[in-house]
Image: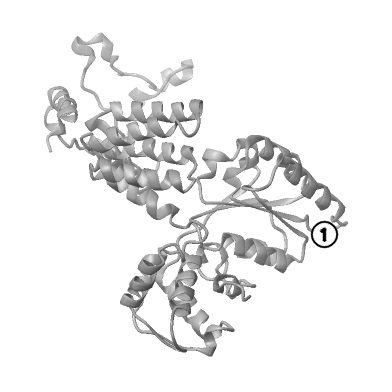
Amino acid sequence: MSEPLAERMRPRTLDEYVGQKHLVGEGAVLRKMIDTGHISSFILWGPPGVGKTTLAHIIANKLQTPFYTLSAVTSGVKDVRDVINKAKNSTFFNSNSPILFIDEIHRFSKSQQDSLLGAVERGVVTLIGATTENPSFEVIRPLLSRCQLYVLKSLQKEDLLDLLNRAIHEDVELKKMNITLAETDAIMRYSGGDARKLLNILELVVGAANSDEVVITDQLVVDRLQQNPLAYDKDGEMHYDIISAFIKSIRGSDPDAALYWMARMIEGGEDPQFIARRLVISASEDIGLANPNALLLANAAFDAVMKIGWPEGRIPLAEAAVYLATSPKSNSAYMGINDALQEVRKSGNQPVPLHLRNAPTELMAQLGYSDGYKYPHDYPGNFTAQQYLPDALQARRFWHAQHTPSEERQYQRMLQLWGDRFKD
């Protein structure tokens, strides 16, 4: 039986590798590390199908060093220790440490990660981890501090088109056929920047053809996927599509759709902590100041899931999803912090006004630190107008109220205190 197309097309060298030029292009950080032949432990973070596993294999082949791989889904502490012992025995004087590649490292428990820590610290192994989740949530701090973090991006349209054409003209099976790429919008849309998904779709469409002449059109792709909607998703890549639909349903105030997409995730075996985290994010990003209780409820649901586990945890998650979907919406805090970050990146480190600085020493007081600061609690209503932003940004606004009933009260208070400064 022939290997799947995605496996047959897996790059063996950096020259064959598609995308991630910011990491492996000429002069990029990983390319330099590989060319010198000395690499340190690192974690690759990015969505599925962008080349994390492939990159680890290419590095091992290039350095010609022993390569061990573990899956966090199926491996336990004993497996980690067995691999570390093998690595010790395969290390030779003046050679690179063996590479230990751990797929889905975010699924490793704390005890599993603890069992790795010593070997990474002593250089017994060079760790390469791959994760689709933010490592700061799931990777223990001591291990994370000993690894560089590199972020991989979804593949661009040009990368995917290049991969499609290479598969059609270079793959040992596909090049026997006469395949024409007449239209590519549908296959690009369904692949979502995921190379593996793209090749799975191509294999499905071509495999369903009745002859060696195949003209790939948008309608043909849609028809094939409707007939066999999971065939291109063998490894659960719809994870990101479904969580996107879930969040957008909450944002769009549709509790029925939110419950449906949550049910899809639950039935698909999604980690309940993943769902709970997205609810907390949605409560802050999309509901925000329109209903501050939303964040409290989302946090409570997260705590409840951690305490009671599965399957009962579905109930507080569902409660939170419905509450968030039916709440009024405001992203003013989300937009405000993004605007403030953009200003910081543009204007740099503006000096703190002297009256806002702390003066713990006599010298600082002599230099004018804290001089002229007005303590708000000494004034009627616990407020007095004074400058809080840097001199160069005195008139800058970041928060703009969106006038939901809850937020309107906050806005009116700002008008009362600050007057024209807060008039939109």
Asked which colour scheme the image uses, the reply is: one colour
Is residue 418 shown above or below 219? above
Give coordinates of residue 230: x percent, y percent: 44, 62
- Image spot of residue 328 (x, y percent): 20, 35
Which quadrant of the rendered structure holds the C terminus? Answer: top left
Depicted 225 relative to depicted 180: above or below: above
Please tell me which residue is depicted at 33% across the width and 51% down the height of the picture.
245
Q: Picture quarter containing residue 254?
A: top left
Q: Is residue 149 visible?
A: yes
Q: Secondary structure at mark 1?
A: loop
Label 1 Cα neighbours within 10 Å, binned few <14 / some 14-19 / many ≥20: few
Q: Residue 54: x, y in percent?
A: 61, 64
**Measured from the top left, where is residue 89 in percent x and y?**
87, 52
**161 relative position to 381: left or right:** right
Q: Residue at x 52, y 39 (%)?
A: 137
Along the line of sight, which residue is nearer the eye, 24 or 228? 228
Determine whether 140 is above or below 129 in the image. Answer: above
Side of 149 relative to 420 (left or right): right
Q: Nearer the viewer, residue 311 or 307?
A: 311
Closer-to-camera residue (75/106): 75
Q: What is the quadrant of residue 416 in the picture? A: top left
Please name the residue that numbered disc 1 is placed on: 95
For the question of whether residue 339 can be seen, the reply is no
Residue at (63% x, 75% y) in the render: 1
Q: Nearer the viewer, residue 399 or 161?
A: 161
What residue type is disc 1 on? Ser
Q: Is residue 305 above or below residue 237?
A: above
